[in-house]
Amino acid sequence: MRALIAGGGTGGHINPAIAIASIIKRYEPDSEIAFVGTPNGMENRLIPKAGFDLYHVDITGFGARSISGGLKYLRQMSASVREAEKIIRGFCPDVCIGTGGYVSWPLIRAAEKMKIPAAMHESNALAGKAVKALAPGLDVLFVNFAETAKQVRCGNVVHSGNPLRADFGKITRDGAREKLGLEHYRYSILSCGGSLGAEPINVAAIGVMNSFCRYRDDVHHLHQAGAGKIEDAKRMFDSLGLSGCPNLRVTDYIHDMPERLAAADIVIGRAGAMTVSELAFLGRAAILIPSPYVADNHQYKNAKALADRGACVLIEEKELSADTLEKAVSSLLSDGSKLKEMCESIRQFAVENTDGIIFEGIKSIIK
């Protein structure tokens, strides 16, 4: 199979794109796969690192613009489609695949014009602008949340779930706890505000460590503060006298996240689509604090879809404090049946055999 994949801008689009490429390679090792992105996005670091070639098109986000700015942007969009057509003619793909975001627009639009089979994957509960605009011309649209299908006009929507990293879920809870030296703790809490960190989550998480976890020697709590915010977090952590507590730890970045997630009983963090899918796959109780700074508030929609079915605790950032977070943590740890029910509920959002569904769906549209 020869596949061109568009996924760029943010990790939320890039990581699923790389995962789909890995799925194709696993099922058909002789496949030729390349990516289409922008010259300045995260894809320029992540995609070559994953071992794939990257072509560039000149396109920027869909944000609000003046009339003159809008006309200029329409010309840019048309030019980017022509650039994508040139890439397609040179690469000769059997299929073009997009994972949402504005980077997907030129490749998928060009594929539709050139009668190349086209597929997209939407990770979030709320379909993005590019997915909605391109959906009518797609041969197949894969969705992570079943309710997303109601938001788009596409004749072939497949509930596939999110493709995860190939090594994800390979270790059990007990195996992870033993590997990490946590087997003598009854509970393990993992909290983070993303790779760059989030100050409100840092303050609330360290506050919970101070008011609750330091008095529970059966609870281990690890918090990822983010590389740019670790100094402030460490100062707060040390000033509260928490550095002497062996069950509490603050770090800038967690490099062994699959093992840490596997070992956790409660996960506190943002509500990105990949995070939600990983928690569902593992069946982990979650306290989700959606980022209010993302397009269309899609993280809130992700968390709300879970919270409405008892699959997570949803705390909006404007309501977040050490007190509200402690109440949520204490409530889960004090009620074993509630904790178990939440784990079972979030597990219902996981889709069995996601990789097979996506691969077979792509193969089915190749003429």
Image (cartoon, grey):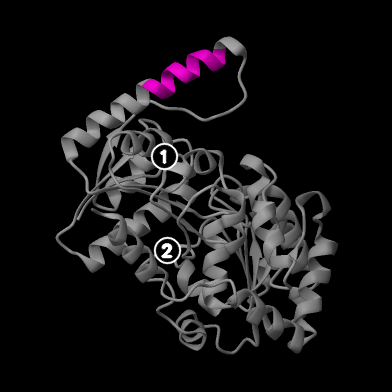
Residue 272 in sight here: no
* Extent of the magenta region: 69-78
**CA gap, disc 1 and disc 2:** 18 Å
| Residue 73 magenta-highlighted | yes
Please give left or right for residue 63 compared with residue 333 in the image: left
Q: Is residue 212 above or below residue 59?
A: below
Q: Position of residue 41 (x, y in %)?
A: 41, 36
Q: Position of residue 210 (x, y in %)?
A: 77, 67
Amino acid type of the residue tagged 1 in the rendering: Ser
Q: Nearer the viewer, residue 124 or 263?
A: 124
Please give left or right for residue 128 compared with residue 317 in the image: left
Amino acid type of the residue tagged 2 in the rendering: Pro
Return the residue at label 2.
163
Q: Is residue 95 above or below residue 262?
A: above
Q: Position of residue 212 (x, y in %)?
A: 79, 73
| Residue 260 magenta-highlighted | no
Return the residue at label 1.
104
Q: Main secondary structure of the magenta part?
A: helix
> Residue 217 sits in which quadrant?
bottom right
Classify mark 2: residues with Cα within 10 Å, few (<14), some (14-19) or many (20+).
Answer: many
Residue drawn 50% across the image and 62% down it: 254
Q: Secondary structure at mark 1?
A: helix
